């Protein structure tokens, strides 16, 4: 079983590109004969992690790929690390606004993804999908879910998982706006590429994709 997740709209928006991409990617992969389930998570600290954990308990997945919307980014961002910190610049959908609070009390400072992000980067680039390895998933609900996922996976050594940020869909951006975006179909295809690459990769590529700042 493969579990894909995206988020409900937040911040006053009416859509969230991550959920649309997760649903569409699930359909693509199901058409290829894979057992895939897509779940929409609430954009709420605590509740999002609980919803993810409940979905994992029901599905018993071998792979969990969580996606989130990162307005302002122009590429598919393969997240490398989740940190144990909630620090919200804006309230979540329940009005929560934690500042400098741990995702998991007494948990480790950080977890690295268990996805082969370098191999995924190479596969996305080969498909001419703009992509990058990201060194920070932020400190909002996306990072909260990413950290909660990796914390849960420490007890499931046979299951791999990680997080991908995607830009706005082009349909979310007003005509004439300079905000970066990608076609919704391309972002769904990107999630499917990450899934296929992970299933077919046991050891990640050694490929330079770091950052200088």
Image (spheres, grey):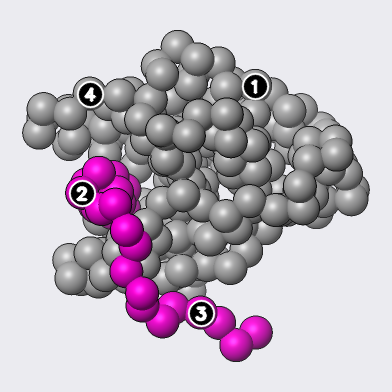
| Residue under pointer 4 | 35
Q: Which mark is residue 210?
A: 3
Q: State the separation of the CA atoms marked 2 and 1.
A: 29 Å
Residue farthest to the left, as pictured:
32
| Mark 2 or 1, closer to the camera | 2
Q: Secondary structure at mark 1?
A: helix
Give the residue drawn at x 26%, y 39%. Answer: 25
Give the residue drawn at x 50%, y 29%. Answer: 156
Lateral position of residue 176 relative to residue 47, left or right? left
| Residue under pointer 1 | 50
* Towards the viewer: 127 or 9: 127
Which quadrant would the C terminus be assigned to in this image?
Answer: bottom right
Marked residue nearer the N-terminal end (1 or 4)? 4
Marked residue nearer the N-terminal end (2 or 3)? 2
Q: Which mark is residue 200?
A: 2
Image location (x, y in percent) of residue 145:
62, 38
Q: Note whether residue 179 is visible.
A: yes
Q: State the separation of the CA atoms marked 2 and 3.
A: 23 Å
* On screen, residue 55 above or below 65: above
Marked residue nearer the N-terminal end (4 or 3)? 4
Numbered range of the magenta stretch:
187-213
Q: State the separation of the CA atoms marked 4 and 3.
A: 33 Å
Cβ–Cβ below 8 Å for labels 4 and 3? no
């Amino acid at each position: 079983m493969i579990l894909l997740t995206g988020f409900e709209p937040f911040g006053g928006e009416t859509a969230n590109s991550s959920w649309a991409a997760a649903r569409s990617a699930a359909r693509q992969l199901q058409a290829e004969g894979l057992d895939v389930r897509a779940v929409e998570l609430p954009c709420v600290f605590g509740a999002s992690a609980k919803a993810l954990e409940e979905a994992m308990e029901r599905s018993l997945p071998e792979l969990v790929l969580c996606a989130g919307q990162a307005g302002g980014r122009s590429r598919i961002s393969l997240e490398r690390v989740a940190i144990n910190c909630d620090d919200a610049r804006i309230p979540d959908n329940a009005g929560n606004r934690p500042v400098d609070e741990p995702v998991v009390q007494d948990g480790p400072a950080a977890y690295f993804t268990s996805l082969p992000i370098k191999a995924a980067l190479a596969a996305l680039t080969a498909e001419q999908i703009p992509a990058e390895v990201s060194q920070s998933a932020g400190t909002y609900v996306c990072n909260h879910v990413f950290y909660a996922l990796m914390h849960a996976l420490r007890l499931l050594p046979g299951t791999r998982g990680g997080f991908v940020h995607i830009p706005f869909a082009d349909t979310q951006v007003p005509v004439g706006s300079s905000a970066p975006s990608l076609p919704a179909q391309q972002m769904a295809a990107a999630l499917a590429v990450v899934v296929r690459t992970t299933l077919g990769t046991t050891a990640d590529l050694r490929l330079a994709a770091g950052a200088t700042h």
